[in-house]
Amino acid sequence: MVEVPLHRVAHSRAGDKGNRVNLSLMPYDPVLYPLLAEQVTEERVLALFRHRGATRCRRYDLPLIHAFNFIVDDALEGGVNGALNLDGHGKSHSFRLLGMTVRVPAASLPAAG
């Protein structure tokens, strides 16, 4: 097993709903779905956004499409209409999630291209 940032093994997109950030997470290889389910928890994702005032995180598992959806409350400093930050829609928050580290089998890493 090796420790790598999530971006080595998964893709994410982010958006907003009011003062909530919505994050998808999809492993490139569906075989990694159970490992990510164990490691990318609501608690770990909430910790990534606490500095922004986040108060709650919910994870929705989508096993038939090997994906997760995270909803993080109070992470957008008031939301697109109320925030003065440069990313009111929270689009860049997927990069924060993809910086989280996970442990995966070395053989599951995509070949360097």
Image (tube, rainbow, N blue to C red):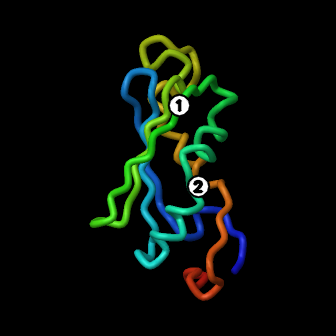
Which quadrant: the N terminus? bottom right
The residue mark sitting in front, 1 or 2, is 1
Left or right placement of residue 109 versus residue 1 in this view: left
The residue lying toward the viewer, choosing from 95 and 39, is 39
The percent position of residue 90, horizontal first and vertical second, equals 49, 33
Determine whether 30 is above or below 25 in the image.
Answer: below
Q: In this view, does 45 lie to the left or right of 27?
A: right
User: Which residue does the image show at 37% across and 27% down from the upper left?
Assistant: 17
Tell me the residue at 46%/67% (across/down). Answer: 27
Label 2 sits on a secondary structure element that is helix
Relative depth, front residue between 102 and 9: 102
* Badge 1 element: strand
Q: In this view, does 98 lie above or below 59?
A: below
Above or below: residue 37 compared with residue 106: above
Q: In which quarter of the image is residue 29?
A: bottom left
Q: Which residue lies furthest to the left in this view?
A: 64
Location of residue 109 in the rendering, given as x and y in whole percent from the top left corner: 59, 80
Residue drawn at (40%, 31%), measured in percent from left and top? Answer: 16
What's the distance in space between the residues labelled 1 and 2, CA to CA?
19 Å
User: Residue 100 versus residue 46: which sits nearer the camera?
Assistant: 46
Residue at the farthest bottom position: 107
Amino acid under label 2?
A: Leu
> 29 left or right of 47?
left
Q: Earlier in the sequence, mark 1 or mark 2?
A: 1
2 to 61, vertically: above or below: below
Q: Mark 1 points at which residue?
A: 56
Residue 113 image position (x, y, % from top left)? 57, 81
Q: Please state which amino acid type lies under the numbered disc 1.
A: Arg
For label 2, count other residues whose C-alpha is less than 10 Å away and answer few (under 14), some (14-19) or many (20+).
many
Residue 98's disc number: 2
Label 1 Cα crowd, 10 Å radius (few <14 / some 14-19 / many 20+): some
